[in-house]
């Protein structure tokens, strides 16, 4: 991990060179590096927390001066009970996930002794730009090494001291392992970012972890592919047949459990036959939790008729803009739609293609919705807050992607891999096939045994079996 | 298919709207549209060829004036024996491929009655920019409709009349099918491209099919993800243990069979113990085929010692730049490398990460090479010309990608798809799980039965079985 005054080009080149060495290390060597990082950070806790106090002091001053929010100060604090230990445990959790690389995911017999395999491999060099939370550096470093990728990390300015301390410890730890230290590069000054974004020869993927503005800026400034999401405008469509109690439970979870999350609910679409029946129960529960309800005329009228005067007095009228806004706050826009088709058109136009849900007992309506909604996650009878890598069983996540290519929804280790095509042959050539020549076999071969054969001996046996004895003899 | 004077924004919006309708059509409806296009183009052959003659006349004039190459004129000609029929057959070939969308590729039981599925779906709207060959419009239209994507197509100026005729026929054919005509938009003027490249809200993926300059220009001008390859600098490393006869067969195929192809061999790396043994045989065969050999000092000396004086007189010395050049011609750069490690470093630095091969009998050397080479296709004992969608068994290809994300190597229908995450639940919510709450099951469920159950009844049965009777009752 570099903390030198290297130029952006030197940083990117070093990461690229390191990435090729990292890519061919064994699962055991990569896992051992994660163990070493974990142990070094456990031993270096005092050193990191001392640096963190410097960041906190500066942040508190800035907050007192009004140039930094109190919530940001809180996010900086690594000394909060359990936070450091969670960071340490996160490294071991990533280490213990299944190795995402060197997996055969497809095999085709092209001809006798001519086999095509698709094998997962690292992407190469990642550029990850993230905000204040200093513990993210440990998490991202673990994900990068586990997936065999080098990473250039740019953190928030506010956590500079904490970053430097963590980076220095990780660097020392890596020097005792097979993973080259160059595989993790920390850049601390903001002005290098624009130079790094030009280096698409060396950097393969950029992951900005931050707000809309950051992601937009990165996308507009680079030819490097960008993985990220700009907004989280999530919608739920409530049908008249869905029980009020379950609907309330789902909507309250989606809106209230973490309003600042990108998977929080921002819009509730309501079928006409739910306006006077289910909606009032839901609205009452949301108002009790302090949620502001911004209603279209139909839902406003229905709620005014069905809520007690005190609750009714809290209702607000929505504006057109409310249906294109990520509130990230205890605010919910409510809109009446005629039917599932209208709900689909509204969501495909106004949601941010992140996570949208339908609440209904009708499998016909649900299947129409699940098929037609163009979002990374689409749910039937559950909360939009389910959109999360840990909840999906990925162990951890790099972020949530609203991209339409590569990786969509919560991105786990698999999203940090790609594949290569490998052909093993015996001097067959292209001109032997086609018009008048040999025919391709194109026979799909099983790959399951790849997963079953876990130990090295079995894999070696399989390899020999597949290559065939005769292939190697000239 | 629009041939109106619509603005780029209108074109993109219409494609987006059409794409959502196309995305929910059944396999049968999409296939029926391909049949209709095929039949209409078969019936309209005279109309298309009449338009094609206009393009050819203009092109011949330009060629006579020196502003267009003769090879481009040839590529324009749809009247060449068998070309039109090949175009028609290509549409039926794509129609008969397996449907790439609505496939379940992963399933996880999150909890009782709470199932997560990953289901393939179209990407949305493609922008495809291609060069002269007018038959590509039929091929690309077929691929787009088959994969459920809308496409905005921009062809070369030289084939304007042919495009317009084909587009008009496809448009009429689509109007009799379930596929909205708006799903295929033809743009004919070059100046709209820069506006279209700004519309990343409506366009999900850009595929430039053309030279290095076009791809670079597109990548530098847009925030839309770009799928393509800039160069095809392919290398082969020859070890001393590989038999001369097989090596010659492979190298001649790779260099000579289609030198203008992006998968043609441009560099031969030679181990020291092959210089005086195998290399002379290979060099002799290449020289006979008219290939210019540009040699480093060691290979030049070895060949001069081992070839007859006439052949030796044809040899050239290489320059540094020859090892970074895509010749696309009967030229081969030859370089001596000390061992497989040096070959790997050279290829990872100088090849274009397209397709690289090793020729050896040593499985140790081959496995090192296959693991360490960072290219989309890596081969053991076969020709780099194997890198092709048809040869890989994809039926057809959109192009070859040297991207490090989404799709790598020959891109077939699968590269035009992405997935969505679908959860079917029964009012479970996020706050019920985690610290002190319920535990996630995260049990991987089988997906094979999805493939086995081909008919609608079986699929419906499976669906009901998975959802469970109890889920739907409130």
Image (cartoon, coloured by chain):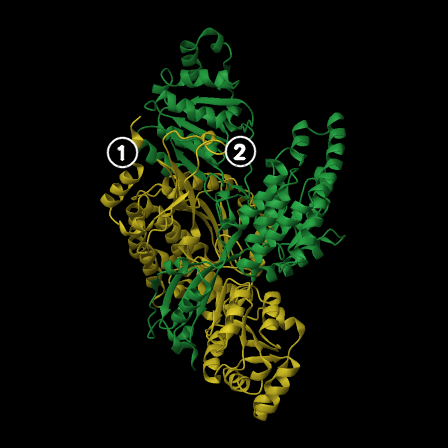
Chain colours: A green, B yellow
Q: Is residue B456 above or below residue B383?
A: above
Q: Residue B420's image quarter?
A: top left
Q: Is residue A219 visible?
A: no
Counting from the top left corner in percent of width and height, residue A279 is at: 40, 18
Dots 1 and 2 on the same chain: no
User: Does residue B202 appear left or right of residue A42 in this picture?
Assistant: left
Residue B433 rendering spot, x and y as whole percentages? 46, 33
Determine the residue located farthest toward the front in the rendered image: A43
Quarter of the image containing the C terminus of chain A? Answer: bottom left
Residue B469 shows which numbered tag?
1
Crowding at mark 2 (Cα within 10 Å: few <14, some 14-19, many 20+): many
Q: Is residue A320 above or below residue B399?
A: above
Q: Label for residue B94?
A: none
For mark 1, name the chain. B
Q: Nearer the viewer, mark 1 or mark 2?
A: 1
Task: Name above or below for residue B423 compared with residue B224.
Answer: above
| A138 over B371 or under it: above or below | above
Q: Tell me where residue A52 appears, x and y as whole percent.
A: 72, 38
Numbered badge on residue A262 = 2
Question: Horizontal placement of B373 versus A444: left or right?
Answer: right
């Amino acid at each position: 991990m570099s903390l030198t005054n290297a130029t952006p080009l030197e940083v990117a080149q070093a990461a690229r060179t390191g990435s090729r060495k990292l890519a061919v290390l064994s699962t055991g060597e990569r896992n051992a590096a994660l163990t070493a990082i974990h142990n070094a950070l456990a031993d270096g806790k005092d050193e990191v927390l001392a640096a963190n106090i410097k960041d906190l002091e500066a942040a508190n001053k800035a907050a007192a001066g009004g140039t930094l929010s109190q919530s940001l100060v809180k996010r900086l604090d690594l000394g909060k009970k359990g936070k450091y230990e969670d960071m340490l445990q996160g490294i071991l959790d990533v280490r213990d996930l299944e190795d995402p690389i060197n997996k055969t995911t497809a095999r085709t017999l092209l001809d006798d002794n001519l086999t095509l395999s698709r094998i997962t491999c690292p992407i190469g060099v990642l550029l990850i730009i993230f905000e204040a939370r200093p513990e993210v550096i440990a998490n991202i470093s673990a994900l990068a090494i586990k997936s065999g990728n080098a990473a250039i990390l740019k953190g928030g300015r506010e956590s500079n001291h904490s970053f430097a301390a963590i980076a220095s410890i990780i660097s020392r730890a890596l020097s005792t392992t097979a993973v080259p230290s160059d595989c993790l590069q920390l850049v601390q000054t903001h002005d290098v970012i624009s130079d790094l974004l030009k280096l698409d020869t060396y950097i393969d993927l950029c992951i900005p972890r931050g707000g809309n503005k950051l992601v937009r800026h990165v996308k507009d400034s680079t030819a490097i592919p960008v993985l990220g999401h700009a907004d989280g405008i999530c919608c739920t469509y409530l049908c008249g047949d869905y029980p009020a109690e379950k609907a309330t439970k789902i909507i309250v979870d989606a809106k209230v459990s973490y309003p600042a999350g990108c998977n929080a609910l921002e819009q509730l679409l309501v079928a006409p036959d739910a306006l006077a029946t289910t909606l009032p129960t839901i609205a009452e529960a949301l108002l009790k939790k302090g949620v502001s309800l911004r209603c279209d005329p139909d839902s406003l009228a229905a709620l005014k008729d069905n809520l007690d005067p005190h609750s009714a007095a809290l209702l607000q009228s929505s504006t057109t803009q409310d249906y294109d806004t990520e509130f990230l706050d205890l605010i919910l826009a409510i809109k009446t739609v005629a039917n599932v088709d209208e709900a689909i058109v509204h969501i495909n136009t106004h949601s941010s293609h992140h996570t949208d849900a339908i609440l209904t007992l009708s499998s016909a309506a649900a299947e129409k919705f699940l098929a037609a909604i163009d979002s990374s996650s689409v749910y039937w009878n559950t909360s939009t807050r389910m959109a999360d890598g840990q909840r999906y069983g990925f162990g951890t996540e790099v972020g949530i992607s609203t991209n339409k290519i590569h990786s969509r929804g919560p991105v786990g280790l698999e999203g940090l891999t790609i594949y290569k095509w490998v052909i093993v042959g015996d001097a067959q050539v292209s001109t032997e096939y086609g018009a008048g020549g040999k025919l391709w076999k194109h026979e799909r071969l099983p790959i399951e045994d790849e997963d079953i054969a876990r130990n090295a001996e079995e894999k070696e046996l399989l390899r020999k079996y597949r290559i065939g004895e005769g292939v190697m003899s000239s």
